[in-house]
């Protein structure tokens, strides 16, 4: 621990090696802006950093980003919920190259991002409301994954590849491969990942998983002003799901999720404008079996996304983005029934520079959905910069409609004796978010951010214990039973404080010494006017520290990550499970690079101190997990 915290705060000794800051350009607000102009807390994590972390899946990588809480049900991508600023897991929007990936069946699948880490150019984490730009779900924040194909980045070598294998305790056996070819006008890339393990011994089963993904991306410049990019991906997951969704002792569940993702992006650049067209299609099949003797739930969803938007520069001080979006969601299910839902929106985003130091950004969205009438969603952000200091503030409205699980879970079965019950009469969530903060750039490598925020929510959707007599629909329920009903909470107030630190040190003259660091502190408080406790609002962290460090000396890399979390205590006596008030999770990877072989060897320890912990009640995470592997690339 002393070594970890020494590394954590050691950047202060290296400050003399860097120059003045050039601000990072971000795109999470649909306007390419310098970070300091957005009026928002946005973290940008480069692909080089992501690939150095001691993690084997993207949900594990997100776990160590400042201010992001990832509640894992299972290891290495089996399943995880992503939270930002104390919102529920459905209140975080996931984008791939500007197109929403959130699943219409359930937010539990939003972390299934079918990309090889080497294909990621960067990840932008926008904290706070962004529904006026991106629509439903963007209440707690937005995670925008930008691929090298989508960024159409062409500064790297013409041919690159990466391949590796890993093996470890509990029957761990992983493999990955990635390849990219680039010419002057086009690029082609393909990647695959495979994570497999027998897992720890559980009650009547084992924590096995077999998770695989593969993707291919293509980008081409068409003439002088047109660019085309295409992506196709598949994601296949089979895993133990014991107590992922229940706290029943009879639960020995397993789950199989199959999804496919296709995306087309067309961009035209003209004098003073840039036009974008996106078309995407997602198909998902989920088969969940509570125990071997029970017939499985079979759910098949489809989602089509079409959007067009244009970025305009009216003068030196004003830029606009205006666009249209259409989304179609469908489900066919033996458990939830057959349903379809249409959604449409029109929006405008404006950015103004007032003088040399002041920037104002406004956005307005008109949203229409088959479950609610048309609604206007406004937002305004402002920033003031003087030298190394930026002051920022934001005010925004947010909305979120229920997914198919929240509306129809266990709706279509002949008899349900317990568990979670959907509610077709759920109202749409409405919220207002406020924030104020400051960023200080001591130099070009070190940035510190601090801020306070508050979110006032009405009709927030969560699961609450409800007796049979109070159920709004009793057609297939058992008299006298108690259920977890999807319910609108009358009001929830969430407030907090966040502090982020990011340092990216330069290599020395020989390129043999470098330090990179990310760290974040989040303090949260949520209060509900409802006396009955709800599940997810009770589960989010009240205090969170997450950090990662990459330290290179010669041919050795020492990569560490940690999460410390404090939350409410919970217990489930029937299965002997509890949520401790706090836990500390540390991971470590030691890597040695053999440059003549263009390869590296590594040793990795997950849960280094072998702590017993769970993120959600009943879902026991593994203890210490040791592995070793080799990775080649050039």
Image: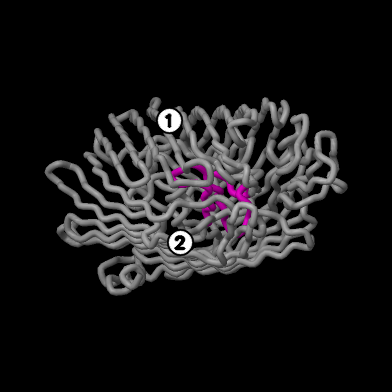
Residue sticking out furthest to the left: 596
Instruction: Name the spot of residue 94 as percent of width and height, x first.
Output: 54, 44
Marking on residue 489: none
- Residue 611, magenta (yes or no): no
Q: Which residues are magenta?
A: 69-94
Is residue 535 shown above or below 525?
A: above
For disc 1, the marked residue is 227
Answer with left or right where residue 8 lies relative to residue 343.
Answer: left
User: Residue 85: image x %, image y %?
Assistant: 59, 59
Examine the rendering and report whether any part of residue 362 can be seen.
no
Report which quarter residue 281 is drawn in: top right
Q: Is residue 476 above or below residue 364?
A: above
Element type at mark 1: strand
Q: Quadrant of the N terminus?
A: bottom left
Decide: few, some or many residues near mark 2? Use Cα within 10 Å; few <14, some 14-19, many ≥20. Answer: many
* Residue at position x 74%, y 62% in the image: 528
């Amino acid at each position: 621990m002393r070594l970890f915290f020494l590394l954590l705060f050691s950047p202060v000794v290296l400050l003399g090696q860097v120059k003045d800051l050039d601000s990072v350009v971000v795109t999470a607000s649909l306007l390419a802006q310098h970070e300091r102009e957005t009026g928002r807390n946005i973290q940008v994590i480069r692909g080089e950093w992501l690939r150095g972390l001691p993690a084997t899946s993207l949900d594990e990588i997100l776990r160590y980003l400042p201010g992001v809480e990832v509640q894992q049900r299972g290891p290495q991508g089996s399943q995880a919920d992503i939270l930002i600023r104390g919102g529920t897991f459905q209140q975080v929007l996931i984008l791939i190259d500007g197109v929403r990936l959130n699943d219409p069946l359930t937010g539990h699948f939003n972390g299934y991002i079918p990309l090889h880490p080497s294909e990621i150019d960067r990840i932008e984490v926008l904290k706070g409301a962004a529904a006026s730009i991106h629509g439903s779900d963007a209440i707690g924040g937005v995670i925008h994954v930008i691929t090298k194909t989508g960024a159409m980045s062409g500064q790297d070598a013409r041919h690159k590849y990466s391949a590796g294998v890993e093996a470890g305790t509990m029957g761990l056996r992983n493999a990955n491969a990635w390849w990219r070819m680039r010419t002057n006008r086009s690029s082609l890339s393909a990647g695959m990942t495979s994570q497999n393990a027998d897992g720890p011994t559980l009650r009547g089963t084992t924590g096995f998983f077999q998770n695989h993904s593969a993707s291919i991306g293509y980008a081409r410049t068409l003439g002088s002003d047109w660019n085309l990019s295409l992506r196709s991906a598949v994601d296949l997951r089979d895993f133990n799901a014991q107590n992922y969704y229940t706290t029943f002792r009879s639960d020995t569940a397993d789950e199989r999720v199959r999804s496919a993702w296709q995306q087309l992006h067309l961009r035209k650049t003209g004098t003073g404008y840039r036009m974008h067209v996106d078309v995407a299609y997602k198909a998902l099949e989920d088969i969940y079996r509570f125990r071997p003797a029970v017939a499985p739930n079979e759910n098949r969803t489809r989602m089509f996304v079409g959007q067009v938007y244009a970025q305009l520069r009216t003068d030196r001080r004003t830029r606009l983005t205006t666009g249209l979006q259409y989304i179609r969601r469908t489900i066919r299910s033996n458990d939830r029934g057959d349903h379809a839902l249409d959604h449409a929106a029109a929006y405008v985003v404006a950015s103004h520079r007032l003088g040399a130091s002041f920037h104002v950004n406004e956005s307005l969205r008109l949203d229409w959905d088959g479950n609610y009438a048309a609604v206007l969603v406004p937002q305004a952000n402002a920033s003031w910069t003087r030298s190394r200091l930026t002051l920022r503030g934001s005010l925004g409205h947010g909305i979120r409609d229920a997914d198919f699980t929240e509306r129809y879970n266990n709706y279509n079965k002949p008899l349900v004796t317990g568990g979670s019950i959907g509610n077709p009469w759920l109202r749409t969530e409405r919220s207002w978010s406020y924030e104020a903060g400051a960023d200080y750039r001591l130099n070009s490598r070190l940035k510190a951010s601090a801020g306070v925020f508050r979110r006032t929510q009405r009709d927030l959707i969560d699961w609450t214990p409800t007796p049979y007599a109070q159920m709004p629909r009793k057609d297939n329920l058992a008299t006298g039973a108690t259920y977890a009903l999807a319910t609108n909470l009358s009001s929830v107030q969430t407030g907090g404080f966040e502090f982020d630190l990011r340092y990216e040190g330069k290599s020395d003259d020989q390129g043999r010494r470098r330090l990179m660091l990310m760290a974040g502190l989040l303090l949260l408080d949520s209060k509900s006017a409802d006396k009955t406790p709800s599940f997810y609002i009770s589960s989010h962290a009240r205090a969170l520290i997450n950090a990662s460090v990459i330290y290179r000396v010669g041919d050795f890399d020492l990569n560490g990550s940690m999460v410390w979390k404090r939350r409410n205590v919970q217990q489930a006596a029937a299965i002997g499970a509890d949520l401790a008030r706090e836990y500390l999770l540390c991971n470590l990877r030691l890597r040695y690079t053999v440059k003549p072989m263009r390869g590296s060897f590594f040793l990795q320890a997950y849960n280094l101190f072998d702590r017993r912990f769970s993120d959600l009640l009943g879902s026991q995470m593994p203890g210490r997990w040791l592995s070793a592997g080799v990775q080649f690339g050039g």
